[in-house]
């Protein structure tokens, strides 16, 4: 069955605006939830928070703030800031959807920076990533990295910055599950933990450095990230270590 929502963010992370039609308002006890036939907002997941944005109705110029997007019953829904007068978009309305771009772009740069960190830590120290989280401009990654020390983090920072500066392309690929399972590099990101029902695996490749199964939005080349700083590291036990980074040149 063809999905009724075109989820643009997964193939074009740079789409800032889209024309869309309101399909329906989803049932909600909380804030209003709008389903559009096209969306450019990332619904959150894999440590990357959801986007925010704006819906603008073509007919009368009325605006609604989208404070988050998320999945509900498999579809992306847009959570609106409840308007004071209670007026909501209606099914069939033609609208323009804008993503809060400065925030999204900072998340793209941050997310790619974290993958570069994973790539360096795996390549040079053989340490597996176990989790991560981010906000615009900063993030953390957890590794099974017994030998990590304060001396090493400076070295890791320099290596990550060297990789970012070298201008590596970042590619999105979607491939059949069986094919994904044959790529040794994907095993370390626990592709085997993906639910049975998922037939297509989306991967993010920093060419020559890192390959991961991933649903997030990324920049197209590492030079867009700029540089990073390691802002902290912690032991979460004998083996599990956490590294915190921030973009060296954070968004204004
Ligand atoms: Zn990721």
Image: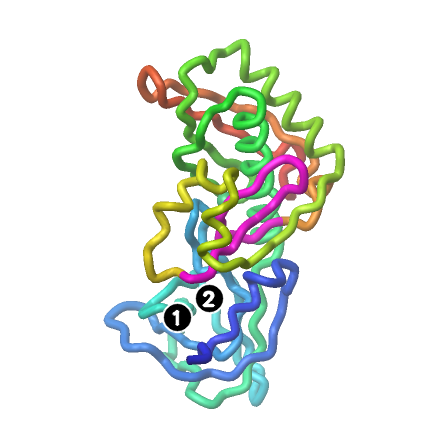
In the displayed structure, would residue 92 be above or below residue 189?
A: below
Classify mark 1 as within 8 Å of ligand 1 or not, answering yes or no: no
Along the line of sight, the residue nearer the viewer: 224 or 99: 224
- Write down the residue under mark 1: 75
Residues drawn in magenta: 199-218
Along the line of sight, the residue nearer the viewer: 96 or 233: 233
Element marked by disc 2:
strand
Q: From the viewer's perspective, is 214 left or right of 130?
A: right
| Dot label at residue 66 | 2
Q: From the viewer's perspective, is 139 left or right of 222?
A: left
Q: Where is residue 86, by image quadrant?
A: bottom left
Where is residue 136? Give x, y as percent: 53, 44
Element marked by disc 1:
strand
Label 2 vs label 1: CA separation? 16 Å
Where is residue 230? Give x, y as percent: 56, 24
Q: What residue lies at 61% left-to-right and 16% top-to-bottom?
A: 155
């Amino acid at each position: 069955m063809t999905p009724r929502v075109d989820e643009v963010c997964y193939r074009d992370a740079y789409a800032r605006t889209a024309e869309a039609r309101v399909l329906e308002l989803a049932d909600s006890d909380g804030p209003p939830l709008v389903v559009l036939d096209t969306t450019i907002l990332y619904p959150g997941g894999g440590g990357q928070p959801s986007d925010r944005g704006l819906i603008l109705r073509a007919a009368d110029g009325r605006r609604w703030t989208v404070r988050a997007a998320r999945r509900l019953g498999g579809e992306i829904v847009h959570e609106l800031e409840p308007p004071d007068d209670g007026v909501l978009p209606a099914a069939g309305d033609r609208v323009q959807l804008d993503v809060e771009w400065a925030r999204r772009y900072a998340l793209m740069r941050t997310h790619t920076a974290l993958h570069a960190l994973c790539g360096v830590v795996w390549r040079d120290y053989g340490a597996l990533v176990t989790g991560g989280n981010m906000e615009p401009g900063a993030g953390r990654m957890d590794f099974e990295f017994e030998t990590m020390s304060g001396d090493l983090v400076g070295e890791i920072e320099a290596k990550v910055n060297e990789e970012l500066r070298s201008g590596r392309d970042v590619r999105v690929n979607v491939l059949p599950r069986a094919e994904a399972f044959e790529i040794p590099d994907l095993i370390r990101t626990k592709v085997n933990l993906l639910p049975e029902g998922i037939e297509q695996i989306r991967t993010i490749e920093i060419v020559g450095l890192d390959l991961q199964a991933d649903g997030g939005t990324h920049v197209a080349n590492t030079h867009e990230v700029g540089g990073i700083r390691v802002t902290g590291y912690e032991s979460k036990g004998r083996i599990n270590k956490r590294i915190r980074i921030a973009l060296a040149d954070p968004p204004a």
